[in-house]
Image: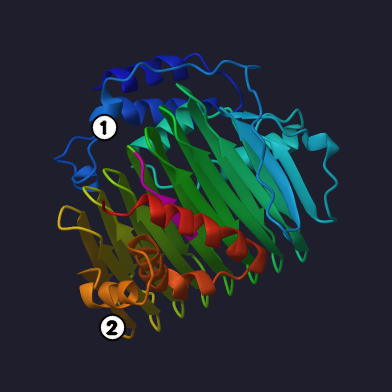
Amino acid sequence: MSQWLSQVIDEARQVTDYLEPVRQQAIAKLQQNGWPGRRNESWRFTPLSSLEKRQFQAPSAGNTPVSSVETITGLNAIELVFVNGELVTNLAALSLPEGLTITSLAPDNALQQQAIAELFGSIKPGHHVFGLVNDALCQQGVYVDVAAGAKIEPVIRIINQVDEDADTHNRILVRVGEGASVRVMEQGEGSVSSVSTLFAEYCIADNAHLEHYRMVMFSDSARHIGGCHFKLHNASSLNSTLVGYGSELSRLDVDVIHAGEHANAKLNAIYLLAEGELFDLHTTIEHAMPNGTTEENARGIVGDRARAVFNGRIHIHRDAQKTLAELNNRNLLLSRRALINTKPELEIYADDVKCAHGATVAEIEEKALYYLMTRGISRSKALVMLNFGFIQELVNQIPNKAISEWLLPKLSERFLMMEVK
């Protein structure tokens, strides 16, 4: 077992609250499973050496200077800010629309504690080592409850800021009631040496709709590992957009469980890696009920000496007849020293389904680059234009115009960082 994981377990044993049964179960699994090595298929291409011998940093309550939060022009949002793992937003001061309740993970109300305990860990798979770390250590987070039939217009924007040497472990729990709709944006940022885990669980009831965003904007020496886990019930729908930057260690696991008939999931992912960075995206779609649909598109651009990992799995259970599922992964390498390990998977046990999957890996076309440069466009700008064209289709599909317009200049800035010198 690694030094860091041993210290995590020691720290978790000191936490006592109403979630203690979950924590004790997580500690037991961590001790049993140990540290994931390169022989572990899920971590085969994602080295953890930078974290293995790190000294665990216990959270220091009250020492949370708040960085300015970037405004998204035109976005009607309820903003919840975490700094170094601590929720600094005063929830009592928020003006919430009817049908929306937001509480911390340490409520005084026994009924709220019961609701949180029922959802906590019920959707996230129990095999993810860092998900178990989050189970064991998480004391800060938010529980969002959307009442049946409520249509919540403001975007719930959850911002996670991480500073130097911080270890943070937060949880987001969202329950969307029957026939309700809500928009949630998770945004993480930080470029200094740190470790953060952030896992989110979403229970989407019958005929409910969730518009979801996860912006994993950590870079440089930051180490971030997280997950988004969704459970869809009858005729519910999910539209999720994921944007990931590379860093010293960046990993995101996504699970979508079709637990009801006629559920619909759309998942678009964009990952952009600058020189020497790493990003790992693992997605699993479980079709357990009939008549479900899934459309998943992931596109990545990998810079010089950067490494990307994509593992996308669609599992069609025996009873999931009439399923329609499609998975596509496309990658663009900016140099011969860039690397992508891509593995799209279909596992089908039903016989009346329509499914497809595929992956492509390509390089920037020199003719197109030369054509733009002969028209007086600099190499840097030409690369931005070609790169942006590669992901433009997915950007155009973002449902919220304010978020898409906010994202465009960020992507352009990111492309300039990725230019091969």
Q: Position of residue 399 (x, y in %)?
A: 61, 71
Q: Compare marks 1 and 2 and give the one earlier in the sequence.
A: 1
Q: Quadrant of residue 373?
A: bottom left
Mark count: 2
Residue behind mark 1: 33
Q: Position of residue 210 (x, y in %)?
A: 61, 63
Asked if 174 appears above or below 208 in the picture, the reply is: above
Asked if 93 appears above or below 310 in the picture, the reply is: above
The amino acid type of the residue labelled 1 equals Asn
Which residue appears at 27% of the width and 20% of the height? 53
Residue behind mark 2: 351
Q: Is residue 16 visible?
A: yes
Q: Quadrant of residue 128?
A: top left
The amino acid type of the residue labelled 2 equals Asp
Quadrant housing the N terminus? top left
Asked whether 312 or 126 is in front, the reply is 312
- Badge 2: few (under 14), some or many (20 or more) residues near its Cα, within 10 Å? few
